[in-house]
Amino acid sequence: MKFKSLKCLSLFFAFAALSNIEVKALDPGTLLAGQQVAPLVKEVGPVMKGVIKGTTESVFAIIGDASEILYLPLGVVESTLGLPFGGFGQGMGHLGKGIAAPFKVVGDVIQMPLKMLGGK
């Protein structure tokens, strides 16, 4: 325990010694420009929240549909090896799901810009 705290303390001092932090005063022109931009940033916030929400939904939909591609080899194995055991129907279902998966991914990629802009 003592060695761990000594290690953390030495890392802290190493980073503190290597950092180049300079404090600078802002001139009135910079402050005025910041005050003029602040209301615009406040208006952009909700829009960006919608863009981020749409993007994450699209990315998770793409990942989910891309993972369905794994049903293709599963369906092949189930429909061939499971034929004597009654697994042919389930294997064909998985095979169809695996074949449709790349088309679903393409559809999700095409819909992604619309979802990013708030469309459904």
Image (tube, rainbow, N blue to C red):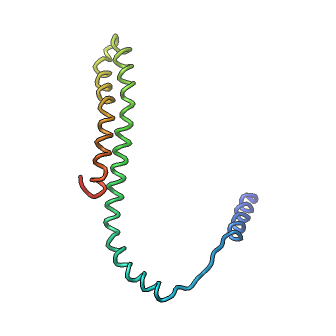
Instruction: Say left or right for 19 vs 40.
Output: right
Residue farthest to the bottom, as pictured:
28
Rendered residue at 72%/62% (across/down):
5
**Residue at screen point 28% across, 48% down:** 111
| Farthest front residue in view | 29
Residue 74 location, quadrant: top left
Q: Could you tell me which quadrant the N terminus lies in?
A: bottom right
Q: Is residue 105 above or below residue 2?
A: above
Relative horizontal placement of residue 109, taking residue 31 as reference (left or right)? left
- Residue 114 x, y percent position in the rendering: 27, 53
Drawn side of residue 48 relative to residue 23, left or right: left
Question: x and y percent of residue 90 in the render?
Answer: 30, 22
| Residue at 34% over, 10% down | 84
Q: Is residue 89 above or below residue 46?
A: above
Residue 40 vertical position relative to residue 75 in the rendered view, above or below = below
Q: Nearer the viewer, residue 49 or 106?
A: 106
Q: Quadrant of residue 96?
A: top left
Q: Nearer the viewer, residue 76 or 84?
A: 76
> Can you give x and y, in whole percent of width and height, for residue 25 in the image?
56, 85
Could you tell me which residue is drawn at 31 percent across and 65 percent down? 47
What is the quadrant of residue 79 in the picture?
top left
User: In x, y percent, where is residue 110?
Assistant: 29, 46
Q: Residue most toward the top? A: 84
